[in-house]
Image: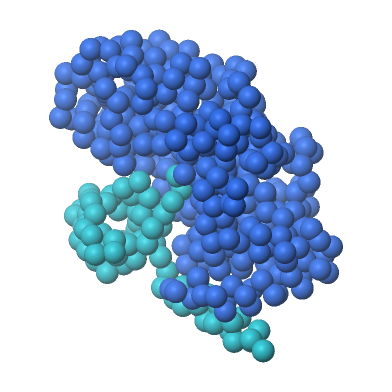
Chain colours: A blue, B cyan
Amino acid sequence: MKEFRDRRVIAGLLRKISRQARRAGPPVRLMEVCGTHTMTIHRYGLHPLLLGAGVEMMSGPGCPVCITPDAHHRAAIGLVTRRENLVLAAFGDITRVPTTEGSLQTAVPAPRSRVQVVYSPQDALETARRKPESEVVFFGAGFETTIPSIALAVKQAAGQNLKNFSLLPALWLIPPPLRALLDSKEVRIQGFLYPGHVTAVIGTAAYDFVAAEYGLPGAVAGFEPADILLAVSSVLDRILRGEPGVDNEYRRVVREGGNPRARALMEEVLEVTDAVWRGLGFIPRSGLRLRKRFQGFDAPGRFGLKVEAASDELPGCRCGEVLRGVISPPECRLFGRTCRPEAPRGPCMVSPEGSCLVYHKYSKQ
Amino acid sequence: MCLGIPAKVISLDENGQGEVDYLGTRVKTNLAFIENARPGDWVILHAGFAISRLDEEEARETLSLLREMADLQDP
């Protein structure tokens, strides 16, 4: 598989892209929706190389830790600091997100309560099994890649009658914010790189509306440098042909219909709801919540929490504009000065796939 | 957080619980989302779950396309 990072392959693809972009009229502006793509693009130095070839890549809202509003983080902090004998389980990076009330890592838990960093929702379920005397709340934040595993954990908890397990849901769908970004007309986007692993679950038809209603092409991309460039070239090809549509350039992993088993499970446990995103605000039908028969496992319901996202900007933090592709991270005054990986002022500097952290890590200061 | 890594299935039980080999390390993995998973299959691993099967034939096709790309363009 070393060909996916081979110097000659990359050079060949860049020459092709450069010829295509010249014909399309540079700079061609494309958005990579997924934060893991942002990581590949910067880690392998593709951003300046593509810019040189006439393609400007903007990063989009594809970082679940970043787009989860302050209200969810504060609800999680509130639970573990105010409730005794409670385990708040969460993926590692989300525990460092700063809020006006500190982070899960700086929070002082109530007596016999604690924060547990987990690798998988199954770990949280295991804790609930082992500690029947404690409430175990899983702070489940993620996109369609992660959501099936969270849905399965809830279904298993129901099946095993694990009454001390519940979910604080921060579950987001990838297609709706694309519509929101395009409708806002705030940024000029000529095409998309679609996220490989989200699409492995939901299938390629989920983006048909981008071509049909907005006339824009896109391609599903994998996560190696050559995968990214193959997808960029395929989007440029569609721009030149004037034929918007969705190409799958990650065929070794993504099938047209996605993963039917994972989709069926999401459908069984969860239902679509309106949601508020950090930086993007209210987006109709962009989130998921537990269906009625699983309501007993809803942490906000169980603990009487109101998770209402309001104006949640952190002082000086321009994470919202970064998530919409309006500015690139170095344009924020805090970037690299008072906001740094070791002392983040906003979520985009926390997550390994947050644009600010990625820029800070890989770009020359 | 949508990081996914290729791994090879070593074993699995009827509930879809199994083990995969990731760079020589055995990792407990839930394979419930993979239809007819068998030892020897390649899958993409994410947060303790296999989310998709890795199609070796498609991988080979992309590889040969990439090789062509490198050879064709070299002066």
Report the front residue among A168 and A161.
A168
Residue at x 60%, y 17% (from the top left corner): A310
Give percent across and percent down for residue A237: 74, 68
Residue at x 41%, y 47% (from the top left corner): A262
Report the front residue among A178 and A205.
A178
Give percent across and percent down for residue A170: 47, 30
Residue at x 39%, y 19% (from the top left corner): A77
Give percent across and percent down for residue A172: 52, 35
User: Taking A199 as reference, is A139 above or below it?
Assistant: above
User: How many marks overall?
Assistant: 0
Residue at x 16%, y 18% (from the top left corner): A133
User: Taking A353 as reference, is B13 above or below it?
Assistant: below
Tell which residue pokes out farthest to the bottom in this image.
Answer: B75
User: Taking A139 as reference, is A37 above or below it?
Assistant: below
Where the N terminus of chain A falls, by quadrant? bottom left
Give percent across and percent down for residue B66: 56, 78
Toward which corner of the image does residue A285 lie, by quadrant?
top right
Q: Is residue B24 among the parts visible in the rendering?
A: yes
